[in-house]
Image: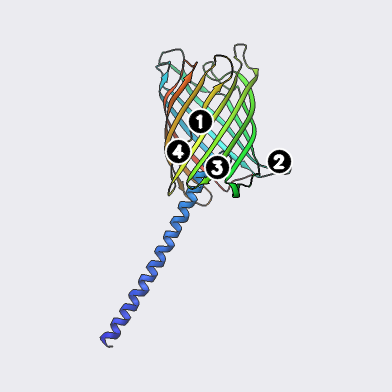
Amino acid sequence: MSDSARHLRAFAASAALLILLGGQSVSLAQQAATAGNDDEALATKEYDPTANLTQFKVQDIYTPAEYGTNAQLNTLQIRPLLAVRPQLFTPLEQLIRPSIQIVTVPRNGKTASTTTALDDFQLLDLFVMPWPNAKETSFRWGIGPYFVFPTSTSQFTGKGAWQMGPAWAFGFRGIPRLQIAGLFQQATSFAYSSSHSVPVSSLQIQPMISYQLGRGWYLKSSDSTWTINYRHNTSTEIPLSAGFGKVWKFGDGYAVDTSFSAEWMVYRQFDPQAEQFGLRFQMNLLLPQVEL
């Protein structure tokens, strides 16, 4: 075989190898991009209170600094969310979210002594409206009832009142990588578990902003809840939070989100005891294929 023929065969073999490796590289890149897009989609849905995404969220909120006490507080919160398909009697998407909290709170005044107990149980039930068309407007909203049940197991926790009221939520995804959402919950007491219970009428506002960085990573300011009490000389609290997280996708049927954020109290009125600074650690099991 002549040298020119050998060179031609070697060149052809090299070209074929490069084409094969290039095709594999493009395929892997496409798979990585697809996985990254899936992760971003899950992270975006997670911080949209109107998204039909079943979740099981566990978060620990540690408060090393609290106004009005030397105690260090902690809240362990378990908050699943169940997405329900439209049914015969409820022809709308439904989102059911119970909240269970185990809290560590100060016993008395400025002392460092604490007690740990079960807090009041909360239940949110949102119905997502089909108009305007979310695919065209990138806007979703929902409305439904909000309940608080006096399940506290200590005199130092809970309000000792049965409460209910309306809730409203929205989510907007019209800006690439950015999501703006909010949740409003109003509760008014109508019955009491103790003669010492105080009437309650309050509004909770949770603003949610998240920005996707790519590959499942994101920045967020979505954890703070503003509380405005309507009764005379009752408290108002406006905290702000900032944090980051990542969605880890392990299969088509589930993913895990881990995040960390810090929270500061920027405004308070008529509240002798309120969070000054807190840290929040969160783990959330995302189940996109689970829907009743």
Rounded to the nearest whole Å, what is the CA distance between mark 2 and mark 3? 24 Å
Find disc 3 in the rendering and name its residue: 172
Q: Which x, y percent locates residue 79?
A: 54, 34
Answer above or below: position of 127 versus 188.
Answer: below
From the image, state whether disc 2 or disc 4 is nearer to you. Answer: 4
Q: Nearer the viewer, residue 33 or 254?
A: 33
The outermost residue toward the left is: 3
User: Which three-letter amino acid code belongs to the residue tagged 4?
Assistant: Lys
Rounded to the nearest whole Å, what is the CA distance between mark 3 and mark 4? 15 Å
Q: Earlier in the sequence, mark 2 or mark 3?
A: 2
Find disc 4 in the rendering and name its residue: 220
Q: Which x, y percent locates residue 152?
A: 56, 21
User: Which three-letter amino acid code belongs to the residue tagged 2?
Assistant: Thr
Q: How many marks?
A: 4
From the image, state whether disc 2 or disc 3 is nearer to you. Answer: 3
SS class of the residue under badge 2?
loop
* Residue count near mark 1 (Cα–Cα under 10 Å), binned few <14, some 14–19, many ≥20: some
SS class of the residue under badge 1?
strand
Q: Earlier in the sequence, mark 3 or mark 1?
A: 1
Find disc 2 in the rendering and name its residue: 90
Mark 2–mark 3 CB contact (< 8 Å): no
Answer above or below: position of 289 versus 209.
Answer: below
Q: Earlier in the sequence, mark 2 or mark 4?
A: 2
The outermost residue toward the right is: 89
Find disc 1 in the rendering and name its residue: 77
- Residue at position x 45%, y 52% from top? 36
**Side of 93 where 182 appears, left or right:** left
Viewport quadrant of the N terminus: bottom left
Mark 2–mark 4 CB contact (< 8 Å): no
- Residue at position x 55%, y 42% from top? 172
Q: Earlier in the sequence, mark 3 or mark 4?
A: 3
User: Which three-letter amino acid code belongs to the residue tagged 3?
Assistant: Phe
